[in-house]
Image: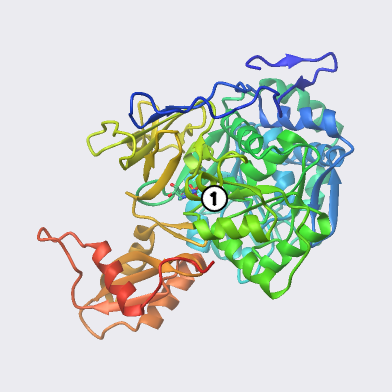
Amino acid sequence: MSILTESQSGRISGIGRDKRADTGEAGLPEDGKSYVRGATEPPLVYATVPQMLRDTVSRYGPREALVFCETGARLTYYDLDRRVDALAGGFLALGVEKGDRVGIWAPNRLEWVLTQFATARIGAVLVNINPAYRVNELEYALKVVGCKVLVTAPAFKSSDYLGMIAELVPELASSRPGHLRAARLPALRAVVSMEDTPSPGCIAFAALETMGGPAQQLRLPTIDATLSPDDAINIQFTSGTTGSPKGATLSHYSITNNARFVTDRIGLTEADRLAVPVPLYHCFGMVMGVLGAVSKGAALVFPAQGVDAEAVLDAVAAERCTALYGVPTMFVAMLAALDARPRDLASLRTGIMAGALCPVEVMRRVQRQMHMTEVTICYGMTETSPVSFQSFTDDPLEKRCETVGRVHPHLEVKIVDGEGQIVPVGMAGELCTRGYSVMKGYWQDRDRTDESVRDGWMHTGDLATLDADGFCTITGRLKDMIIRGGENIYPREIEEILNAHQQVSDAQVFGIPDPKYGEEVCAFVLAAAGPAPDPEALRGHCRAKMAYFKVPKHIRVVESFPATITGKPQKFVMRDMMTKALGVVADPPA
Ligand code: AMP
């Protein structure tokens, strides 16, 4: 359905599911070259996020949409629709306009999903902020995109969000709610806190839900008519292939279509119940999870605010979930928890493992022991909304365990060598993706966008091979990135923070294999003149300035870095040295 059809009720029909199937038949390499083009069925749908929600509400209104196991909150699609409109009215009353940026800093809570849809309802751009960020990371994110409103949880685990905001914005406590003027964040006007009694200067989330009146509700259809599927609607921070975090900017069109295709491949329908333990701030949670389920009218089950294997298994058993998402390390933890205390997971059928290399043995055990006989693997990145490859539920077991599947509909992928030439089938090169899913760009950063997206091709920085049947295997990375427990870590960020320590003259950060997290962060540092730095003190310095998962587990003070004859530090040599010194094994335990 390339053209939307308006039914008499004024609703857009057919956004979620299209009977015409993506069979994977398209997507064969042509002329022995590593180039594939995805199926053209089902068609792309030119719709906004609010249109997608409205379509599902009209079809499946009374069905359950959201379950939050920790709080016991349960919403039907009708409830969700009402709560979203009320909150959208609140944002309007607060002065949020189409195109304004609204940051969200919270773990997986109901307010996150409500904010996701309410901002989209009025065309405001949702800015996802990693709940593990520390003050300087928060400041950078809010400043780069000029957030007008920040919606925040009060605290979670070791993160005192309101405390960190107070440090960054000392003016908040004495300001009139909604009228903030902050020296370090000039664009910020309001902080909305998920508390019953708001902290000084903040607006309570519940109060925001009732702040809009009839006037704001009347404005909603008018605003809706001005929204275009091509508008920017979401910014997610990623370092792409190099450097400091940049705001990958995605449109309604890219995320709604990717969400549809992802859940098409696992055969999700309104009868399914999808457990989402992956974080909402990432595409895996908010696009593949929330929008993917909404596109089909399925129920979303959130086991816990954070990642907790026991809670996931309990939720799947209690809520009779049929589908489950996770990064490989989460599945490793779930399998261990299941061994320790068996649960009845017989309701499970399908799901997705993605985000990092998925070990074959873990895939096999997930099928065998967790009843996920139709589990698939996805490969993608934030900049491509995110998925470009995915297995089909009926692909041969070997292909489903050993590859990331075949190309998604409406996408082209090529694998190129260092000169940009397409390599023959079977040969490794850089994976590049082109099509509807490629981001609009990095927020107000033309140069970095042009470095990554050339002639429409997103250069992923990932190394891959394609086989003659179009199945893709990710073989490594060109980019300097570590993936620890599904979280991406960019060494340069950590190196800069270590270099800022007065006892350090230079630092090199790299990853080593880790049985639990896939990879662990290590650093070699050269001492500045004076007393040698204490590695534990350096870790403390890092803990204060970066999200916990980035803090190097091992820091070694060295005399010199292994380097090429031209003096370029060789991280792969450092990795080998550390791996040998620590005697680590490469593969996660199955
Ligand atoms: P993100 O932007 O956080 O989604 O991270 C994207 C990166 O995660 C990719 O560029 C890959 O390096 C890695 N990645 C994602 N999925 C897979 C997968 N199935 N296998 C291997 N690496 C993956």
Q: Is residue 507 above or below residue 221?
A: below
- Image quarter of residue 263: top right
User: In this rendering, is residue 360 above or below 422?
Assistant: below
Q: Report x, y in % for residue 567.
A: 13, 61
The quarter of the rendered structure image containing the C terminus is bottom right
- Asked if residue 348 shows in the view, the reply is yes
* SS for callout 1: loop
Question: Which residue is painted at 74% across and 35% down in the image?
Answer: 296
Query: Percent from the top left, x then y, of residue 586?
Result: 41, 67
Residue for badge 1: 354
User: Depth check: 577 or 437 in front?
Assistant: 577
Q: How many marks?
A: 1
Classify 40 as above or below 285.
above
* Residue at image coords 59%, 28%: 23
Position of the N terminus by quadrant: top right
Kindly give the residue lying farthest to the right in the view shown: 62
Residue 337 in the image: state x and y as whole percent: 67, 70
Which residue is at a point 29% across and 34% down the rendered structure image? 423
Which residue reaches farthest left?
565
Q: How is the image coloured?
A: rainbow
The image quadrant of residue 77 is top right
Residue 253 lies left or right of residue 272; in this view the side is left
Farthest residue, direction bottom: 531
Q: Amino acid at mark 1?
A: Ala
Residue 225 in the image: state x and y as whole percent.
Answer: 71, 20
Instruction: Decide if residue 460 is in sight here.
Output: no
